[in-house]
Amino acid sequence: MTAQNRYLIKGADLAGAGRTDLLIEDGRIAATGRDATGNGAIGNGAKVIDADGLVALPGLVDMHTHLREPGREDAETVETGTRAAALGGFTAVHAMANSSPVADTAGVVEQVHSLGRRAGWVDVRPVGAVTIGLAGERLAELGAMADSRAKVRVFSDDGICVSDPVLMRRALEYVKAFDGVIAQHAQEPRLTEGAQMNEGEVSAVLGLGGWPAVAEESIIARDVLLAKHVDSRLHVCHVSTAGSVEIIRWAKERGIKVTAEVTPHHLLLTDELVRSYDPVYKVNPPLRTDEDVRALREGLADGTIDVVGTDHAPHPTEAKDCEWAQAAMGMTGLETALSVVQETMVETGMLDWSAVARITSTTAAVIGQLQDQGRPLQVGEPANITLVDPAARWTVEPSRMATKGRNSPFAGRQLPGAVIATFFNGHPTVLEGKLDTPRPGGPAWNE
Amino acid sequence: MTLVAPPTLLPVGAGGWPCDISYDLDETLQQGVDAVMMLRLQAERMNDAFFPSTREYSRKWGFDDARLRALGEQPGAATVIMHPGPMNRGLEISSAAADSERSTVLAQVRNGVSVRMAALYLLLAGDSHQQSTPIEQKGAVL
């Protein structure tokens, strides 16, 4: 037993379940409470982390991350994206399939998976494409990706909607063989040709092409009915409208196996920001209205929306430093997600910290079937732990972030809450709010 | 100010604008207007189901000879006819209307050049721009 893999977290608030100590040993929680501090743990050289005033959450799990590698290493790499994830308190991320080449074969998902292993900052779970090349024409080899070393369980053409109803039906049916889930980017393509922003009062004034709420809602309505018909699991990515929340609530009341995610930016920002014409606010689905923001928060609070997914979408400066219509869609989010959740859900009294654990970690791990993630902080469980200081206040500075992307819509904004430490399978990737070291492990082919 | 157009060409969200909205050009003209300005129907609008055909558009929303005649029969109507150009003659405006004594199209186009020159001059030679703080504050739900 060496000192390197023994850590004693002292006095952390276990997500509302009271203050306790946590002893981490060999990647697992070895003891809690009096057992942790007794038993000669400190004498044995465990590194002590003072967690007085900090909340301990199960390590955050992101349902929706764009790591850009392979193909767009100018925007992000697995290394830089997972450093950002660790700093944001994450211990696992689902890497979306719209890389270049597209993650539509066992080879590409295994590559992304092993890049994640080599980086060692978080568990990188590749998402497989539903259709070959995201073209929406033929199913990708979903079974091969599921059977690969990456063990893919979440499939998505994210960025593009699987709009063909027959293809969507077949995908939903096919992944039942390995209990997979189809994560749909709900966007009716014909209704959103040339779309630049939410269609409504602001788009009418600005004269920018509208992205109507109905383009999202009609696809979600169709897909929950398809999921019901074939009794399959559907996950709805980045829900952005009040109407979508209503449809998902309706579906859940009928026992349809649907889960839904909301992004931090859709919980806080509205399309009023587009009046600035600053493309940092250009995102897909677009920022909506006050009414939508309130409905999303209520949906997240009452369980209609299951998880927060960042849709972290880094872009090089030249893709954002241009006129609105030419700019790329997307925002960074990994390093601000938890703070935005605290601001919009905790500070408003809508959720307590145990519910934050549910929406940022536990449920996402269940949807993605990550056995070692989102577990309760109990003896014997894998030590994936995030320590948060809820009293901290900080001003967002994109230039100081670990992600390569500088496109944070929260730049200059003061946010509450700071990630102080992240333990990834018992190894501290973040200590004192700064990157520590990656977890040694190496690429998957060594194991 | 009244906007007259098929509903497909009026932006969603225009209902809150400080103006009236009508789908009936004749009814609006009968109420007596100081000026009526046609806007050019862009080619891309003609092929994306905004309206069934250019002929139907012309009949319902084009300022044609019949509407020019009706204007002449209104007692004391001093209505001027405007269009920013370039015009689709025979589509949103008839030649008789475009070339009538009521038309101010040529003056409007000439003035448009001056206005554009002034706008470009102000933008290119202007001082540093304003900060967008009010929008930032308005764009978040707190």
Image: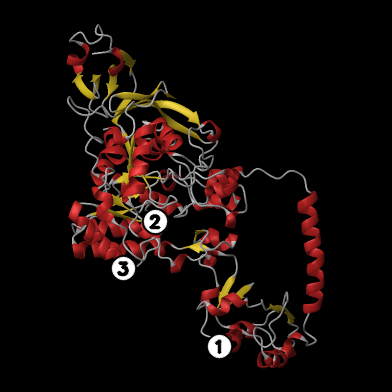
Q: Where is residue A410 in the image (x, y as percent from the top left)?
A: 50, 39
Mark sitting earlier along the chain (3/2): 3
- Do marks 3 and 2 share a subunit? yes
Q: Which residue is drawn at 34% across and 68% down?
A: A164
Subunit ID for the residue under disc 3? A
The residue closer to the viewer here, B37 or A157, is A157
Subunit ID for the residue under disc 1? B
The 10 Å Cα crowd at callout 3, few under 14, some 14 to 19, many 20 or more, is few
- Farthest-out residue, front: A446
Q: Residue B56 carries which label?
A: 1
> Quick check: can you spot residue A92?
yes
Q: Distance between the residues labelled 3 and 1?
A: 35 Å
Label 1 residue SS: helix
Q: How far apart are marks 3 and 2 (CA)?
A: 22 Å
Amino acid residing under circle 1: Glu
Label 3 residue SS: helix
The residue closer to the viewer here, A174 or A91, is A174
Is A421 situated above or below A445? above
